[in-house]
Image (cartoon, helix red, strand yellow):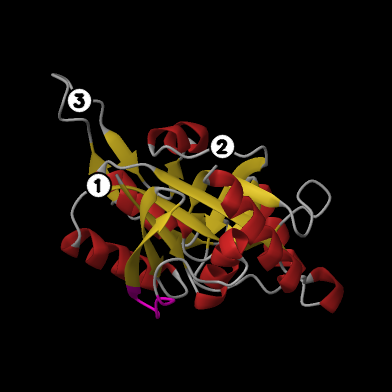
């Protein structure tokens, strides 16, 4: 079993690896953006991948890996994220994504984006292993099962928060837009790569798990609402807890 361990940036990958050995290296040089390397982690065969920031980079890198590497059995997306609710989901906490939403797909109206407004779903599939396959349609949401998928790829399920994560190409910069996203989608966290990776895994029929630590309050640029260093330390610790 080979699991892709994907982060958006080298900084996040370094934080993950520091959780294992304190030095930021596990079996190979730190991958550059869009690259990956083989590396065992606690007897698990892994590919460490740095996708680059944003949904386009994430999709391109995952596509290249899936096209060039055989035997991929799952994807573990680790990194940092913003919180829409710093009381329920405080800075430094870890969150598993139970649902990935891309709020920018569809027809933009005065009431917001209608994911079905252009009538084309992003993916339509089913289970070919049954006589009457249940059709799966993805508009702007991929439902996730983190506990089950962690079990399927042989990893531990940590006792952390879980909720809806939204993926954006442009980071939310105002409290007003943050409130709209929170209210419309029930969002707990915001990231920039998760939906692309989740959809790619859904199409490939392999497990996907997204686990992030909170580095900032969505919509705020105030220094007090950003704790990057603490989020990176927490990321290493929660990553280590997966591979026990």
Q: In screen coordinates, is 226 left or right of 14?
A: right
Image disc number at residue 204? 1
Percent of width and height locating residue 24: 55, 71
Quadrant placement of the C terminus: top right
Image disc number at residue 133? 3
Percent of width and height locating residue 204: 25, 47
User: Residue 230: which quarter of the image?
Assistant: bottom right
Question: What's the residue at 67%, 51% (across, down)?
Answer: 94
Name the residue tied to disc 2: 157
Do callouts 3 and 2 mark residues in contact (Cβ within 8 Å)?
A: no
Compared with 142, 217 (above or below) is: below
- Few, some or many C-alpha atoms within 10 Å of disc 1 (few <14, some 14-19, many ≥20)? few
The mark closer to the camera, 1 or 2, is 2
Image disc number at residue 141? none
The mark closer to the camera, 3 or 2, is 2
Q: CA distance from mark 1 to mark 2?
A: 23 Å
Q: CA distance from mark 3 to mark 2?
A: 30 Å
Q: In terms of depth relative to the viewer, which is nearer, 209 or 131?
A: 209
The residue range painted magenta reads 29-35
Q: CA distance from mark 3 to mark 1?
A: 16 Å
The chief SS type of the magenta part is loop
Q: Tell me, yes or no, if residue 73 can be seen here.
A: yes
Decide which of tag 3 and tag 1 comes sooner along the chain. 3
Percent of width and height locating residue 179: 72, 58
Q: Circle 1 sits in a helix, a strand or a loop, which is it?
A: helix
- Few, some or many C-alpha atoms within 10 Å of disc 2 (few <14, some 14-19, many ≥20)? some
Do callouts 3 and 1 mark residues in contact (Cβ within 8 Å)?
A: no
User: Residue 90: which quarter of the image?
Assistant: bottom right
Q: In terms of depth relative to the viewer, which is nearer, 225 or 49?
A: 49
Is residue 241 located in the magenta-colored stretch of the structure?
A: no
The mark closer to the camera, 3 or 1, is 1
């Amino acid at each position: 079993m080979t699991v892709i361990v994907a982060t958006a940036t080298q900084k996040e990958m370094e934080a993950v690896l520091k959780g294992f050995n304190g030095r930021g290296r596990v079996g190979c040089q730190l991958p550059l953006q869009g690259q990956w390397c083989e590396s065992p982690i606690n007897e698990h065969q892994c590919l460490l991948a740095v996708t680059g920031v944003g949904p386009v980079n994430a999709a391109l890198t995952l596509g290249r890996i899936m096209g060039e590497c055989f035997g991929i059995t799952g994807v573990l997306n680790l990194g940092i994220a913003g919180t829409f609710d710093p009381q329920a989901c405080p800075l430094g906490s870890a969150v598993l994504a139970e649902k990935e939403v891309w709020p920018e797909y569809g027809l933009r109206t005065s009431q917001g984006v209608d994911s079905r407004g252009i009538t084309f779903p992003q993916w339509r599939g089913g289970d070919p292993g049954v006589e009457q396959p249940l059709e799966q349609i993805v508009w702007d949401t991929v439902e996730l099962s983190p506990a089950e998928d962690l079990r399927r790829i042989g990893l531990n399920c940590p006792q952390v928060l879980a909720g809806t994560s939204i993926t954006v190409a442009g980071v939310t910069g105002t409290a007003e837009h943050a409130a709209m996203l929170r209210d419309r989608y029930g969002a707990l966290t915001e990231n920039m790569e998760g939906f692309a990776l989740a959809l790619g895994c859904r199409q490939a029929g392999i497990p996907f798990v997204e686990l992030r630590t909170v580095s900032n309050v969505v919509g705020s640029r105030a220094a007090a609402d950003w704790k990057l260093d603490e989020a990176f330390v927490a990321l290493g610790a929660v990553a280590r807890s997966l591979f026990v």
